[in-house]
Image (cartoon, helix red, strand yellow):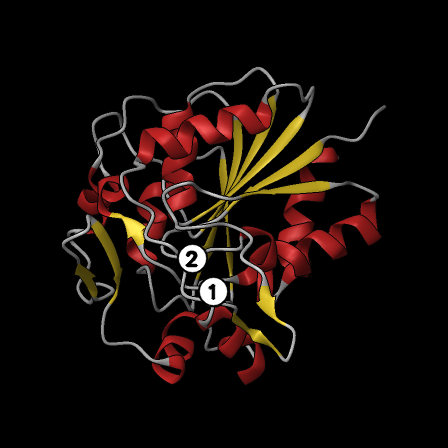
Amino acid sequence: MTNPTVVFVHGALVRDGAWWWQPTADLLRTRTGIESRALALPSCGKPEQPERPDRPDQPAAAPAAPGSPDLRTDAAALRRALDGLSSVILVGHSYGGTVIAEAGAHPAVTNLLLVSSYTPAVGQAQAAIMSGEPDPVAVAVHEDGTVSLDGYDETSFGARFLQDADPATQRAAWHRTTSQSVAALGTPTTNAGWADVDSTAMVCLDDRSTTVALQREHAARASRSVEVPTGHHPFITRPDLVVDQIRAFLA
């Protein structure tokens, strides 16, 4: 039997999608031989920006403003990444789950793994999903139609989003945040791509970005859920836990 391909979909306000998933991709290959791909969402600035060779933790220049790409643009990019593949385990993080929903059903997708993510009903936008959070992530909306993190620096970003990672990883992650088209967060979904697909939702119990209550609300729509003792990015800090869930689909 041929191994499936794993396709990773990153969350909001970050660039260089492959970097975020690399610890899990490497461990997945070592343990299972499964290859993976990481999508770069068009709404999140310029993907795969080259880094300064003297400071690999910093980008060569500030990311270009992403302009007008929205949720539908991101979903179309995901569908193109799936076309031509015969069997896919689709893994989405945070806003990535909303992209998966909008992309709709695809014949190649056999399983979904949703990591601190969402299963939005048709008509829900990402901003609406987050509107009831008691301590929302602070963002600033700019005149060019983009939105970015507001009021964070390397230290406060690490403390909120990657408190269970080492300082070097927190620093590298901070330099991979970017602006995003505000339309991506305000576009209501027109599909529920998670429906009728075997799925596992990972609820991150130490997540300081998305409350456990909101995670559990969306996880209840998945086929099953598991709770893990991690922050918002277990694919960086505990890739073994993510790989375990992917391997469970193969059993």
Task: Looking at the image, tell me whether mark 1 or mark 2 is earlier in sequence order.
Answer: 2
**Residues packed near mark 2 inside 10 Å, few (<14), some (14 to 19) or many (20 plus):** many
Q: Residue at x 32, y 34 (%)?
A: 71
Image quadrant where one finds the N terminus? top right
Q: For this rendering, which residue is in front, 104 or 176?
A: 176
Local secondary structure at mark 2: loop
Image quadrant where one finds the C terminus? top right
Check the image and report above or below for 55 versus 224. Answer: below
Q: For this rendering, which residue is in front, 216 or 179?
A: 179
Q: Is residue 220 left or right of residue 1?
A: left
Q: Are marks 1 and 2 in contact (CB under 8 Å)?
A: yes
Q: Position of residue 170 (x, y in %)?
A: 50, 76
Q: Position of residue 97 (x, y in %)?
A: 41, 40
Q: Residue at x 65, y 74 (%)?
A: 53
Local secondary structure at mark 1: loop
Q: Is residue 240 left or right of residue 139?
A: right
Q: Amino acid at mark 1?
A: Arg
Q: Amino acid at mark 2?
A: Val
Q: Position of residue 160 (x, y in %)?
A: 36, 74
Q: Residue furthest top?
A: 107
Q: For this rendering, which residue is in front, 102 or 77?
A: 77
**Residue 128 appears in which quarter of the rendering?**
top left
Q: Residue at x 75, y 56 (%)?
A: 27
Q: Position of residue 219 (x, y in %)?
A: 40, 43
Q: Circle 2 sits on which residue?
A: 14
Q: Residue at x 39, y 49 (%)?
A: 44
Q: Is residue 192 left or right of residue 115?
A: left
What mark, if any, has residue 176 been given in the picture?
A: 1
Check the image and report above or below for 234 versus 115. Answer: below
